[in-house]
Amino acid sequence: MPPRSFDSDRRATAAQAVRGLVGMGALAGVLVALLALPLVGTAGVSARDGADWFQREPAGLSLTPSPQRSRILAADGSTIATFYYQNRVEVRLDQVAPIARKAVLAIEDSRFYEHGALDTRGTLRALVSNLNSGEVTQGGSGITQQYVKNLLLEQADTEAEQRRALEVTPARKINELRYAVALEKRLSKDEILRRYLNIAYFGDGAYGIEAAARRYFSKSAEDLDLAEAATLAGVVRNPNAYNPRLHPGTARKRRDLVLNRMVELGWIEQEQARRAAADPIELDITETPNGCTESRAPFFCDYVQREILTNPVFGRTAKERERLLKQGGLTIRTTLDPQTQRAAQRAVDRHVPPKNSAGKAAAEVLIEPGTGKIKGMVVDRKLGPNSERGKTWINFAADASHGSSIGMQAGSTFKAFTLAAALEEGMPFGTRLMAPHRFTPTGYENCDGESVGDPSVGLRNSAESEGGRSFSLVTGTHHSVNTFFLALQREVGLCDTVEMAERLGMKRADGKPLEQVPSFTLGANTVSPLRLAAAYAAFAARGEYCKPIAITSITHSSGRKLKVPSADCKQVMDEGVADAVNYVLQGVLTRGTARGLGIGRPAAGKTGTVDDYSAAWFAGYTPELAAAVWVGDPRGGYKYPMSSLCMDGRCYGPVFGATIPAPIWHDSMIGALSGRAASAFHRPPSRYFSRGSGEDRIRVPDVRGMRLSAAIARLRAAGFTVDVGDEVDSTVPEGRVAEIEPGPGTAHEPGTTVTIRPSSGRPEEDVPEDAFPDEPRDPFPFPDGPEDPPIPD
């Protein structure tokens, strides 16, 4: 087909304009006739019926509120994010500057308060103007008709309905006018104007005059001056052509036209118009982010969004829920504490930078004990495409239902559930169990009574020096001894341990039940920081578990309150049991695997290191706040382990729970709790001290010079294991102890092996018989030395 010529295009355009003018003339005649029919007394019955049909309120007339943007607010009322299909902020008429109302009326419908649904004079005037100019330059629709057009367009659910709402036909115009007639009967003029100002499109994504004022001038509609009001009034006729940001010259001419019209009507003085038109349009653009990507708490925002989009309480279908969020003008008040969020984000980004050289990631969730309120939720990434460095769509802090994460193995943080189960069964702190170097996982039954475990698989400790001796509940926890907890789990029962974890809200991040395997206590299940933080918050709340919640209230634009998920707080363990757990876990920060990472106030916690250093955790709490931190590799921890991690020029060697996660927790908690009074944990019931405090480091007695049998008996009575080494040359009589290792007076755990070496001696008659009594005069002659460094978890 040959290309069309310029002349043919011009003829086509002219023909289209003629058709439009003819159509407008015919339409104007039809509309005037229809309105006049009731006034003609000699009209026939059919004419009267037609007029009655026109005047009757059409079926299906709906005055649903205009779509409005929803806001997510932090606990202090500050905005976290906005959601919308149309960026709109509904306002009352008195919240629009009077000069702005005049400007819109002047250019769109100056006789609005004088005529009914159809301004016959205005329609005919527009027709004459268009015929004289040879093109359509003025519309004949008044404010009411324009409101109806916008309303029908908004209520169109399908593309076909949208096309019908926009088509230029007499049928559509007559239908609109029928609606307009009905509205003029139902609503006051002020109410119609208010609705129109809130529904009209002002370009640049701004719907309604309030959103437009904020978009173009960074102010409210009630603060607009004359020049700004005239600019916005001029945009409405053609929001694309008169967009002041995109087309400042055209927009300025249109503004000046509005000013002149206001002068013609006598609504402003000529001098006012001259001053307002003297300068170019000065914009002060404000961006209104849509969604979570630009939020200051992006992953918390995403969690809230998914809470609404996935919960049937907010709509039967996904489409209904999305429409509610993006059109309902919701005010969503949340639990987020900005101070806590900032402290956590700084801590995570400081220790695991978003674009770190090792490709590692970190996530943390902070929850208020006793309420379940999520006070902070952070990931060391921006929310965005995974293909861009330093971004991810996956919320590593939450379950799959709220962020696509399938969870991460929890490591030794699960030992706290075994400890809690043991204490609930009445085991005192001084309860001791042997922790072998390797443990064969036999003798376990799941909650169905089935035997589980593979005798061919040997489980071991993370440090070989930990095994081969006994530990108490306290010291076994402080040093996070794997084989001790495997033995303890078998003692209390695998099912009891699992049920304790379930009572504390634990489930796999993919939503499936926890796997009941011997390595349960070692954290074999994949979970989220969110659930782990909520579980540890229950310890802080003295056994009261609350489901984690992010939303405190939702108010619809209509003022209606929506139902929100409840924390459903329940007492899941005796207060005394929780107090005992807190007593033990406090020592992790003072004498255990996280020694030296206290925060200057009562705190407790547990480190966690996953097999082969594939991930590391720390979960800790005070009576006021609980948090869980995960550090690992999104590409796969076993494929990219942290066995010899170097990141951004800093090398850590193998990464344990105390290496990176615990310092993140430490920094987060200090920042989050700054300025808040500290509370103390409660003392555990006395029954847990029936075998001592469990803090059982004891000094090695000085048995030098004692006969070998007496020395062995003395050391064993003190709780040590004894090994007799080779003889050494000494002036000590033969058969008596010449040397002892570890040295006398040093403090060690019961069960520690003490090596004694007998003397080769010299003639016994050369040494006075009473020079070496069987018992030393002072069995503890040396002051306590420094405590041993913590054993890595």
Image (spheres, helix red, strand yellow):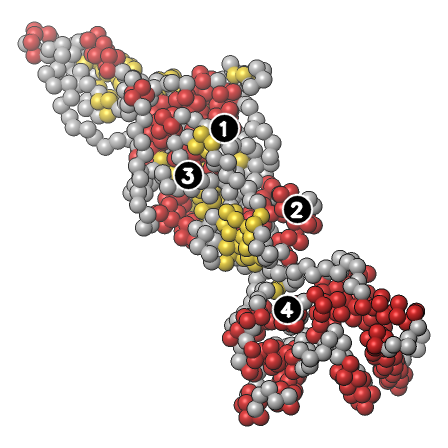
Q: Residue at x 40, y 45 (%)?
A: 664
How many other residues sit within 10 Å of disc 3, few (<14), some (14-19) or many (≥20)?
A: many
How many other residues sit within 10 Å of disc 4, few (<14), some (14-19) or many (≥20)?
A: some
Q: Quadrant of residue 661?
A: top left
Residue 482, percent from left and from top = 43, 25
* Label drawn at residue 315: 2
Assess whether mark 2 and mark 4 are in contact (beta carbons under 8 angstroms). Answer: no
Assess whether mark 2 and mark 3 are in contact (beta carbons under 8 angstroms). Answer: no
Q: Which residue is mark 1?
A: 503
List the single residue furthest toward the front. Answer: 41
Label 1, label 2: how far apart the Cα atoms are = 30 Å
* Label drawn at residue 6: none
Of mark 4 and mark 2, the one earlier in the sequence is 4
Of mark 1 and mark 4, the one earlier in the sequence is 4
Label 3, label 2: how far apart the Cα atoms are = 30 Å
Q: Amino acid at mark 3?
A: Pro
Q: Which residue is mark 3?
A: 369
Of mark 1 and mark 2, the one earlier in the sequence is 2
Q: Amino acid at mark 4?
A: Glu
Q: Amino acid at mark 1?
A: Arg
Label 1, label 4: how far apart the Cα atoms are = 55 Å
Secondary element under disc 3, as helix, strand or loop, is: loop
Query: Would you place residue 211 above or below residue 685 in this image?
Result: below
Assess whether mark 3 and mark 1 are in contact (beta carbons under 8 angstroms). Answer: no
Q: Which residue is mark 4?
A: 191
